[in-house]
Amino acid sequence: MKILHTSDWHLGMKLNDIDRLPECEYALEYLTKFAEKEQVDMVVIAGDIYDSFIPSSDAENLFFETVKKFSRNGKCAVVVISGNHDEPKRLMTANVFAKEFNIFIVGDMNPVSLPTKKFENINATESGSGYIKFKTSKNENVVVACLPYPSYYRYKEMRKDGVTFQEDVKKWFTPAQEQFNSDSINIVVSHLFTYPHEPSDEDRAEVNQISSAYPFVDRRVFSEHSTYTALGHIHKYMQVSKRRNVYYCGSLIHKYPQETSDSPSAILVELEPSSIKSFNPIVIPNLKTIEEIEVKNLEDIEEIAKNKPNSYLQFCVTNFSLSQIYYEIELRKKYKNITAIKIKRQARVSGEREVFVKGNLTDKQILEKFAKTVYGETLKPKTVNLFLELMAEVQNETL
C-alpha cells in the first residue's frame, strides 16, 4: 500500500508583502501529478493546511481543489488533520462534501461520518474516537490513528495538578492506537513537537527554533505497533525514530533560511503489515529558497540579487551610512527578491553612550542626536527634510 505523507502547507502565508500562494499552487500541482503517477492509495496531510485561522477564499479554494485531485474520484483516500495554525471547526465544515470524494478531515477526537457510496480501490469501514479503519481492494486492513494538534483548549479539558502534558497526550491517543492489529497496516498522523534522542546539529537548530513556544511530546507516546508515523509541525524533513518509523516530512515550500534546494517536502512510503517496503523522500524541484547573506557594503547587494532571481534574499550590511538610505530604497524597488536589508550595529570600542532627554527637543534635534550617537554621522539636509515630512504626515493622521 502506497502512502504519500505531506504537511505544513501554510496556504496564505506571506514573506513581508510577497504572497506565496502561487508557489504553494506550483508545489501542490507537482505533488498531485506525482501521486497520480505513483497510483498512491492514501494521502495523509499532517496539519497546518493554512497559515491563519481565517484563510482567504483563494487559499481555501486551492485546498479543496488539491484534495479532490489527490482523491482521483475516490480511488485514493485522503486523511487531513488540523494543525496549530488551523481553526478545526472551520476546516471540518468541508466534511459535508469531502467524504463523498473519500476525503476525511479530522479536527478533534470525535468519530467522522463515513461515505454512503463505495469506491473502487479503498473504502472506510469504521470510525471511532481518533481513528478511521479502511480496507483496500487487495484485502489489506488499514488503521489510521489521528491526533490533531493537541492542546487543552482544543480538547476541552483542564490541566490537572500532578498530571503532565505528556500523560494527557498519551491518554488522548490511547483509544485510537488500541485499534492497531498485527495483521493491519497501522498509521499514526499527528501535528506536534518531538525530536530524536540524539538530534544532529542541523536538526537541533530547527528544534531550538520552536522549543520555547510549544510543549514537547516524547516520541515514546507513539505505539510500537505503528507501521508508520506521519508528523507535521517541524518544517524540516527529520527522522525522529528509525525503530518506530516516526518522521517529519518537511514543509511544502521553504519558509526558513536553513532549508536548502534539496530539502524534502513530502515522503512516499510503501507499507506492509509491520514493515516498510520502500521509503522515498520527495524533493520538489525549483522551489524558491530563503538565504541570509552578510555583505560589507550596499553596493555588493545588487550583483548578488541579480544572480539569484530564484531566491529570497535577506542581507545584513556591516558598513552602512545613513546617507545611503535612498540607494537602499531603490534596491528594494528594483529587486523584488530582496526581502530584508538589516544593518549590523558596530560594537563601541570605548566610552558610554550619551544620554539625552527628548522632552525639550524638536523632532529634528532628536533625529540629529540619534544619528550622531548611534552612527557617528551628521545627516544631510535632504534626509532630515524627508524625516520631518513623514513625521508631519503621521501627526496629521493622528489629529
Image (cartoon, rainbow, N blue to C red):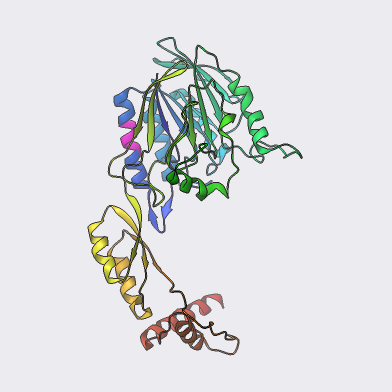
Q: How many marks?
A: 0
Residue 113 visible (yes or no): no
Where residue 345 sits: x, y (%)? 44, 72
Q: Is residue 1 above or below residue 229?
A: above
**Is residue 259 magenta-colored?**
no
| Front-lying residue, 357 or 21 | 357
Identify the residue at the far top of this view. Answer: 139
Q: Please state the horizontal and vertical placement of residue 23, each as a whole percent of the image.
A: 34, 46
Q: Quadrant of residue 327?
A: bottom left
Residue 60 percent coordinates (x, y): 45, 41
Q: Is residue 45 visible?
A: yes
Left or right of 359 in this view: 385: left
User: Who's the residue at 23% across and 64% down the image?
Assistant: 303
Quadrant into which the C terminus falls:
bottom right
| Residue 254 appears left or right of 306 | right
Q: Quadrant of residue 357?
A: bottom right
For the residue pair 133 and 290, the one nearer the viewer reads as 290
Quick check: is 31 in the magenta stretch? yes
Q: Nearer the viewer, residue 233 or 45?
A: 233
Residue stretch in magenta = 28-33
Residue at x-position 49% and y-position 81%? 350
Residue at position x 60%, y 43% in the image = 215
Coordinates of residue 333 in the picture (x, y in percent): 31, 66
Magenta segment main secondary structure: helix
At horizontal 64% and vertical 30% (from top left) the residue drawn is 170
